[in-house]
Image (cartoon, helix red, strand yellow):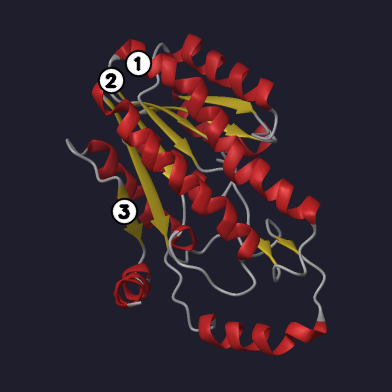
Amino acid sequence: MGKVWFITGTSRGLGRAFAESALERGDKVAATARNTAALDDLVTKYGDAVLPLALDVTDKAAVTASVAAAHEKLGRLEVVVNNAGYGLFGMVEEITEQQLRDQMETNLFGAFWVTQAVLPIMRAQGSGHIVQISSIGGVAAFPSFGGYHASKWALEGFSDALAQEVAGAGIKVTLVEPGGFSTDWAGSSGVHADPNPVYDQVREATAARLGNARYAEASGAGAALLRIVDAENPPLRVLFGTEPIEIIEPLYAQRLKT
């Protein structure tokens, strides 16, 4: 029997790639999106293997209901992927309190609520795999991404603790830390603070530093995730893409040195 997945944020980007990769090999997917019309093509192609669910992960009650509906319909939940999220762009002084709160509601609390909702199900099954889509920005930090980093560093912290808490119940946890992928993360999906001209030089320097980033295809992330969820002993953390290791190695060396 194939695996049964619950994936948030499947309308586009990495979430769509994860869903398509799972469905293509015969797995079943409870696919969530704020507007399920974006999932019509998946339903047309894969039929009953797809369970489209309308979900805004900032709505705790809706999260609980969606997880329950997926479990009732599909019978089990073996792989849960907390993918829903977006980017917040702006210097710490530029972003508003509301922008930061909204960022945390989606990127952190959405994943937190889904995780809490699926844990009793996985514990009863005696198995399960929770995959948290973090970022290279959950390990490293760059100017103008402070709000986004706050959400991903928090996700990393609670997920690391979670992995230790549930290991005895047969539940696995993996933090996926992607680099740049060809998605809409920095486009219409992102939120941009009003720029303060005092940071123009920092902004220009950051753009120059990151301007030559190499963006991988999202479909490659889907194939990579299949390898992770099929592994007997999946890693707690895994880097996706070509650039994260180039960032991580000198960063960790500098941290140890200082």
Which label sits on residue 94? none
Instruction: Nearest to the eye among marks 3 and 2: give it.
Output: 2
In the rendered structure, the answer to whether residue 60 lies left or right of residue 255 reads: right
User: Of helix, strand and loop, which one carries label 2?
Assistant: helix
Q: Please report whichever mark, 3 or 2, sits nearer to the chain's N-terminal start.
A: 2
* Front-lying residue, 93 or 40: 93
Instruction: Identify residue for label 1.
Output: 123
Instruction: Identify residue for label 2.
Output: 169
Q: Residues within 10 Å of mark 1 (few under 14, many from 20)?
A: some
Mark 3 to mark 2: distance in Å? 22 Å
Q: Are marks 1 and 2 in contact (CB under 8 Å)?
A: yes
Q: Position of residue 14 (x, y in %)?
A: 49, 50
User: Of helix, strand and loop, which one carries label 1?
Assistant: helix
Instruction: Identify residue for label 3.
Output: 238
Q: Residue at x 64, y 34 (%)?
A: 57
Q: Position of residue 119 (x, y in %)?
A: 43, 21
Amino acid type, callout 2: Ala
